[in-house]
Structures are given as structure tokens and as C-alpha cells.
Image: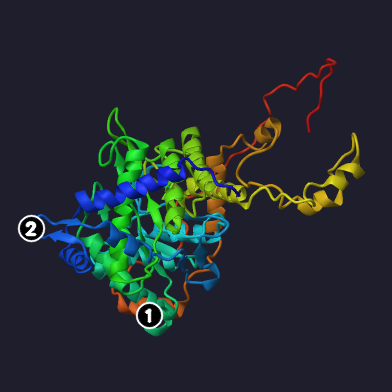
Amino acid sequence: MKFFSYLTDAEIQYVHASSLEILEETGLIVRNAKARKRFADHGAIVDNETELVRIPAEVVEKYRKMVPPTITLRGRDSAYDITFPRELPVVATASSAPDIVDPATGITRRSTSADIARIAHLVNTLPGFDLFSISTLADDAPSDQFSLTRFYAALKNCVKPVRTSVYDVREAKQVIRLGELIAGSPEAYWERPFINFGYCSIVSPLTMDYDSTETMMYFAENGITAYGTIAPMGGLSTPLSLAGMLTIMNAEWLAVATLAQMSKEGTAQIYNFLPVFADMRDGAYAPGAIEIGMMNSAVCQMARFYNVPAGGYLGLTNSKVSDAQSGFEKGMSPLMGAMSGADFIVMGGLQDALMSFDFGQLMIDNEISMMIKRVREGFGFSKESASLQEIKDTGPAGMFADNPSTLERMHTATFMPELADRNLREKWELEGSSTIQQRALNKALEILSTPNSAALGADADARIRAEFEGIVAGESQLQEGWERIDIGSKLPTRARRINRRGKATQRH
């Protein structure tokens, strides 16, 4: 399909040239001494006193061209490995919310490892999600096992690719050891490393922090699958304009990509971003703004210019519940991403500006994801699908419903949602006048009430528990008190419609 775009070729070139100018003349602060030395050893101009690093344009150009055109994220089951760019976008859950909307009480509380286990179980069954970016934190994690706890609960219950960030190299090594224990040996794990990491080494504007930069270099040096995210905030850490944000963000992405290649040539990257514009009336963090989708369109163009995968946090919302605001904020920017050629979309499950996870929202977002993928499948135009002969054969006033081709295409021509209601009002009322949130929670409960066929085997689990004393249970078990919502039924209240001839028409 032809992708939607905002920028002309000349504008893309201007953003690129301006980014090079910023890195060479203005430079960036690099807090990590090892990173400063690495920059200096590869041609950058470094002032250790001020921690300022200026990178000549020719150095950036040399190293950014080493970024591979694809990236592969692996799962515990190789059948779920994903390499992209591909025809359909890869869709992931959004990650690291501190809170969760309790499915039993509806009240927001701190999330735990048990919540991660349940979410992993769900993600494993939902076809809209290709990757589990660990959705919440874990308030019950032992102090020395924070990231280990999150990865363990996720990997124990999900065979799809799993990723999140870690605080430092110690945590990264601990999580990699978890992978080795799951695989059965270090050799088996490193033959197909199935743990994926994220990092955010840039603090806008133009600052590389210490710990995230350290872990990024560690990942690159050791061939560990990881990708970074640029997360500026328009009006606060970038100029308050789409073009200004794009220019500084592009410079920041180039700086990180350059350091990654200096650490190890051929390190895979995603041009991944989480840009938000502050609502300047009160400085509110606004990830549901339509400008996020607009920015993604430009990012996709820059990524194609650099021949790297494009990704972004798109289906996010400021809404606290699954309401109309949530629907349009979660629908519009991912659709723009799909139409603009995004390869990787991070969207599922979170509300309240990434602060809380909701089980019902995850189920709804699964359907949004399926619709996004349907858009990217394309129009499917061919002489056969244009159905000229079928139209002739059926003729004027004919009915296509009983044609063999209709039966053949009924499950493929259109996306058929499970949660979105398409019934007549009378039938909807007879079935209890339910909301999509109620139906979504019931569907999640139904899935979680069945054993998780993807759960980690007992032998691997025993190895993990023997090595990591005090590790959490990590089991996907139905939360106590979570019960099916009794939607009930009642008689329809809407009167029968009167047709144009004044006769009552019975609706079926």
C-alpha cells in the first residue's frame, strides 16, 4: 500500500542535515565516562569537564549506516519469533504502569507479580498482540529481584516475545541468567536468546544519562537484543512545534544509534519514540494527543530514509476508564501509524497517561489491534476480487448472500469483532444492555479461568526456584473475588417502529 506522509523529500533532508548540525555544533551531554571515551575513540570531540560531546557529521554518517534494516525479537517458543519490517505491523502491549484497576473491585491499586502473570496469560492467547512488553511494575518484588520478578512472571506464562527495561547491568545479567535456566543451559540460551530488552538512554533535551547508557553499551557489546526509545515532551524538553520536536528527536536518535554501532557494528535498532506534547494550560502529560499520531507519520518517513524499522507508542490515552475518550485516543493515532507505515506499535492495556493497567482495556485494545492489522492487509484488489462475472451472473435485484463466493469469503473479507456490539437495540437490551467494558472483563475472566497451556514446565521452574531464593510464585491464578459480571436481561423498552405505510413492523 502507499503510505500516508507529511514531509517532502527536501524536508526530510533538512531534518537530517539539521540533526547533524546540532550534534556537531551544539553537541550533547553524556554523563557516562565510558561512553564519552568511546565517542572520543571514534572521532567525537569530548570535554570531560563539562561532559559535552560533539559528534562530527562524517562520524554520525559512518556509524548510522551500520544499523541493520531489520530486527528480530524472539519468544520462548520460536514459532512466535518476529522479524520486521514485515507486511503487518508488530503490535505490543504498553509497559510499566505502576497501578492496576482491580478487576474485582474496580478500584486502582498497586500492581503485583500476580497481575503480570495474569496479563501474560491473556497476551499469550490474544491474536492482536505479537509481543508482551511487560505491562506493569511489581510492588511485591524482593528488593534485589525487581526486574527478575517482572521477567519471571511474564516468561513463565507467555511464549511470545517478552521485553521491558532494567535499571542496570546487574539486573540485566540476572534476567539473562533466568533465560539460561529456562533454556536448560547457557549454551542452549545463547543459541537462540529469547529475552528482549528496552532502554531509554536519552533524557531530552540532548542528554545521555549514566545507567541507561551503560546498559545500552552492555547490550550492544554482548549481542543482546535491545532497542531504545526517545521520549521528548513538546513545549518542555523540545520546541513547541511538530517540526522542532522532530528535529531534536532525530538528533537524539542518531546519537544513540551512533554509540550503539561504536559499541558493536551491526547492532539492531528501532527508530522508536514516545513523544508527547505538554498541555500548556497546565503542563499535563498528554500521550493521547492526536499530534502523537502526526509525529509518528514523520518518524516513519525518517526511519525509511535511514532504512531502519519505525516504531512508536501510539494507542495511549489520558482517560481513566474505557470510555469514548479512550476509544478515540486509542483508535486514531495507531490508525495513523498503520497508514503511515509504522512497523512496531506499542499500545495495549494502559490508561491514565501510562499510569494504570485495565484488564478490560487490554481486551478492547486487542480488537483495535486486529482492526489496525486489517487496514495494513490492504485492499486486496485483483480481477478476481473485483467479481465482475459474479456481478453479471447475479444481475439486477439479485442477492449475493447465497453465492458460493460469499460463503468462501465470509471469514476473510471483513474483520469480525467479538466484543464490539452489532446487535439491534432490542436484542442488546434483552441480553442485558451491557457495555463493552463489561463484556471485555467477562471475556478476560473466561480466558483466565482455563489452565494456561503455555505455562513454563515444572523442571525449568524448579531450576529457577533453586537458584533464586525467595522469588515470587509467578503463577497465573484467578484473582480472588473476580467474578463474572451478571449483565442479566430485561425486556426492550423501545417501541416498535412504524413503517411508512403506518403498520407496525416486527423486528427480528
Estimate the x, y position of residue 243 in percent, counting from the top left.
36, 39
Amino acid found under the numbered disc labelled 1? Arg
Estimate the x, y position of residue 341 in percent, counting from the top left.
52, 50
* Residue 135 shows in this picture: no
Amino acid found under the numbered disc labelled 2? Glu
Q: Are marks 1 and 2 in contact (CB under 8 Å)?
A: no
The residue singled out by tag 2 in the image is 49
Q: Number of labelled discs?
A: 2
Rendered image quadrant of residue 9: top left
Q: Is residue 63 left or right of residue 338?
A: left
Tell me the residue at 32%/69% (across/down).
220
The residue singled out by tag 1 in the image is 463
Q: Residues within 10 Å of mark 2 (few under 14, many from 20)?
A: few
Tell me the residue at 33%/57% (across/down).
138
Q: Which callout, 1 or 2, points to the residue nearer the camera?
A: 2
Estimate the x, y position of residue 347 in percent, counting from the top left.
46, 49
